[in-house]
Amino acid sequence: MVAGVVGRPVAHSLSPILHNAWLAGAGIDGVYVPFTPDARGFRRLAEGLRGGAIRGLNVTLPFKPDALAVADHASEIARRAAAANLLVFDTDGRIYADNTDGVGLLRAFEVQAPQWDAGAGPVAVLGAGGAARGAVAALLLAGAPKVWVVNRTLKSAEALAAALGPKVVPLPLAHAAGAFRDASAVINATSAGLGGGPGLDVPLELTRRTAVVMDMVYKPLETPFLAQARALDRPTVDGLAMLIGQAEPSFEAFFGQPPPGEVDVRRLALEALGQ
Ligand code: ATR
C-alpha cells in the first residue's frame, strides 16, 4: 500500500517521517513517499493516479486549492476551507478531497490545552490566507460563536468574512486589541515568524490570562509569538501538535486504521527538526 505527500518544495515535509513510523509500528506493508511536480504537473499526477494505484495523497503548499479542484467529491470542510490537504483515490476511479487541517487544529488544542472549549467564546485568528481560512472554517464547525479575522490587509479579512458568514468579523492588524480583550484563543495563521523571521507585533498582554495562544508555524517550534505568550504565562499550543493532528485522520483514510498510539511521532519530528 502506497500513499504520499505532494508539495513544492516537499523535501522539508515531516509527513513521510510520521506516516512511515506509524506504518512500521502497525506492521502494515506500506510506504509513504514525497512527490514534487511542477506547477502544471499537479493535475497530471492526480489524474494519473485515478483508479487506486496508490491509496491517497496529502497535499501541501502550493497545491491545496488545486487538490480541491481535481476532486470529484469534496467534504464540507474542504469546500468551506476552499482547499484540500487530503486526496483519496477510490478503485472506481473517483477522487475524494478532504481537509484534515481543521481537525488537526482542534486536536492540537485537545492535546495541549484540554481546558479550552471552542464554543465558550470568540476566537481571534491572525491572517487571512489559505491557512487562516481553513482555521476559521474549522472553528465555526466546532461551534465558535464568533471568529475575529485580524489581518494586515483588511480587504483580505473582509473577503474571508464574506465567504464564511456573519459570525466572522474582519479587523485590521493595527486594531488587534479589539479582538484580544474577549478572545478565548488567539491563533497565528500568518506566515510571520516562519523560518526564524521576525514575529508579529501584537499586544498579547491585553488577552485574558486564560486565553490560549496558538501558532501554526512549527519551524521554529517556539516562534517569537509563542515565546511572547509564554513570557505572559498564557497557555500555548504549537504547530507541531497541529501537524500531527492532521496526519492522524489522513493515515486512517489511507490505511483503514488509526495510527498506533505507542509510536512517539512527536519525538521523531522534534529530532528531525533538530530540537
Ligand atoms: P497561507 O496560504 O499559508 O495562509 P498566504 O495566503 O500567503 O499564506 O497568507 C499569508 C498571511 O500571512 C496573510 O494573511 C498575510 O497578510 P497580508 O494579507 O496582509 O499579506 C500574513 N502575513 C505574512 N507576513 C506577515 C507579517 N510580517 N505581518 C503581518 N502579517 C503577515
Image (tube, rainbow, N blue to C red):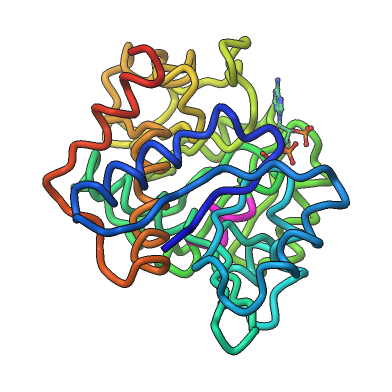
Residue at left offset 28%, top offset 56%: 117
Residue at left offset 42%, top offset 52%: 246
In the displayed structure image, the side of residue 41 where residue 250 appears, left or right: left
Q: Nearer the viewer, residue 198 or 167?
A: 198
Looking at this view, name the residue that lies furthest to the bottom.
Answer: 92
Residue 175's image quarter?
A: top right
Residue 135 is one of the magenta-drawn residues: yes
The image quadrant where one finds the C terminus is top left
Residue 85 placed where, x, y %? 58, 57
Residue at left offset 59%, top offset 29%: 11
Residue 268's image quarter?
A: top left
In the displayed structure image, the side of residue 70 where residue 246 appears, left or right: left
Residue 267 placed where, x, y %? 24, 27
Q: Nearer the viewer, residue 223 or 229?
A: 223
Residue at left offset 44%, top offset 25%: 206
Residue 254's image quarter?
A: bottom left
In the displayed structure image, the side of residue 14 where residue 107 appears, left or right: left
Residue 210 is one of the magenta-drawn residues: no
The image quadrant where one finds the N terminus is bottom left
Q: Which residues are magenta?
A: 133-139
Q: Main secondary structure of the magenta part?
A: helix
Residue 15 placed where, x, y %? 45, 41
Residue 153 placed where, x, y %? 81, 36
Assign ligand 1 to one image quadrant.
Answer: top right
171 vs 209: above or below? below
